[in-house]
Each structure stands twice: as C-alpha cells, then as structure tokens.
Amino acid sequence: MNKITLASAIALATLNVAQAETERQHGAHVHGAAKLLIAQEGDHLQVVLESPAYNLIGFEHMPENEEQWELAHHARHTLEEGDELVQFSKRAKCEFEADETRIESEIMDEVREHFHGDEEHGHDEHEHDEHAHAEHDHEEHDHDDHDEHGHDHDEHAEHDHDEHEHSAHSDIHVHWTFHCDNVDRLKDADLALFKAFPLFEDIDVEYIIGEKVGLIEADAKHNRVKF
C-alpha cells in the first residue's frame, strides 16, 4: 500500500511541475498539445491522457450535425481501445484491463447517450413506471410555483448556455489500466495516439516506473518513450 501511495504522490508531483511549466509557456489549453501520465503501481500501470477535445474530434462544442456525432462516436470507440494507443514492451506482458477504462468529458457523455441511450433507458424503464404516479402527483403540487418562476429561469439558462457555448474550452480525460506479468522488464512504450488522432502535435509524457521518474516530449516522429 505504501508503494502505491508513494508512486501516486511522486507521479502527481511530476505532473504538477510539468503542467505549471507548460501553462507558463503556452497557457492551460493548447490545441495540438496534450499530457500523458504513466505510473506504475505494483504490477499495474495507470495511464492518464489529458487533451483538448479538439485534438480528438476536431471541435470543442456539442456535436451539431450527424457528421460531428459520428466523428465523436468514432473517437470514443478508439479511446476505449487503450492497448491500441499505448503499446508497452512485449516482454513485460502487459494486459489491457478494458473494464477499468474511464472517459471523462461532457461531450463524450452526450455521445454515449446519443448512440446508446435507448439501451440504457430500457433497463430503467420498469423502475421508472413504478415511480411515475408518485412523481406525477408531486409535479402537480409544484406546478403553480414552477410557472411563477419558469420564465426567469428559462431566460437565465438560455443566457448561460449561449455564453458557455462561445467561451468555454472542453478537455477530455482518459484513464487506462494495464496489468503486467513481468513489469520489471518494462523498458518502453510506443504511442500510436499520433496515428489514431493526427491533430496531436506533441504530447508531454511524465512517467514513474519503479525508481525511474522522467518527462519527455513525444511527437509523431519520436513516438517511443524509453523508461
């Protein structure tokens, strides 16, 4: 447990230093740039990608047409295949744990809902019917109060929405987990991210592998990270 805690603490410290330097040079959100953290915790590797949405889907707002929905859907599917994007030394025998993958992004959440919402709602339909009558009674009770304030609320929400659409950046965070049978034989990682997502220009890679801690900048021509 102490080793895991220490590894996480050192990796976080390394990430914070690199992030501070990057933000001083470029700002916190730079199209074409991203950060990748690779941290060993026992016989597991935790890999975290932090990137502007632009690098992955070409835009940073909610999809507005079918082409953009499809682009975002394809990107999400690609990100779910972490072992195709980050490939570790074969001798280390690292197995990708797909069930542990997490993709954190408002856009990607909407994409999942758009393409798979009916499947997810189907599981909840029975529970929804059981509570529908009670919710209906509650809504009738509050209906008058809601009408009194609805107009102001709608104007406020629309104003906030418009400001958000035009001013906010959007980042995507992805967390992958690998289990390695021979983690001591881990020597390098090939980043296929540049091939999968051509809008990437450079990725700052911070790693802590055993006692090795480092920071390297990778790009499409130099996409192998040596530990």
Image (cartoon, rainbow, N blue to C red):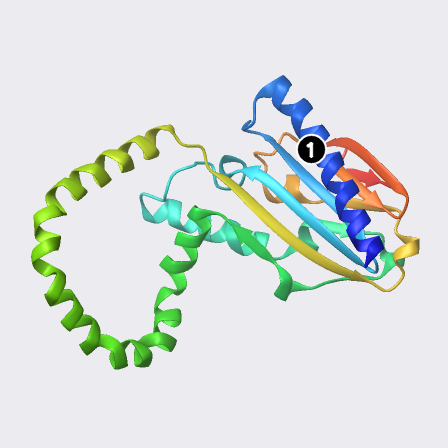
Q: Nearer the viewer, residue 8 or 101?
A: 8
Between residues 114 and 50, which one lies in front from this camera angle?
50
For the image, the number of numbered tags is 1
Asked whether the viewer can see residue 210, the reply is yes
**What is the x, y in percent for residue 180?**
82, 61
> SS of the residue at dot 1?
helix
Circle 1 residues within 10 Å: few <14, some 14–19, many ≥20: few
- Residue at the far top: name it: 25
Report the side of 12 relative to 23 (left or right).
right
Q: Can you tell which quarter of the image residue 185 is in? A: bottom right
What residue is drawn where x is 85% and y is 56%?
90
- Up the image or down, 62 lies above or below 83; here it is above
- The residue depicted at 29 percent of the width and 76 percent of the height is 128
Residue 55, by quadrant, is top right
Question: In the displayed structure, does residue 131 sit left or right of residue 180?
Answer: left
Front-lying residue, 224 or 110: 110
Q: Residue at x 21, y 37 (%)?
A: 156
Residue kind at label 1, given as amino acid type: Asn
Q: Is residue 58 left or right of residue 47?
A: left
Q: Is residue 101 above or below residue 132?
A: above
Q: Residue at x 65, y 39 (%)?
A: 194
Question: 8 above or below 220?
Answer: below
Q: Mark 1 = which residue? A: 16
The quadrant of the picture occupied by the C terminus is top right
| Quadrant of the image containing the N terminus | bottom right
Which is nearer the eye, 63 or 145?
A: 145
Query: Residue 9 in the image: x percent, y percent?
Result: 76, 44
Please state the horizontal and vertical placement of residue 189, each as a whole percent of the image. Answer: 80, 46
Q: Can see residue 205?
A: no
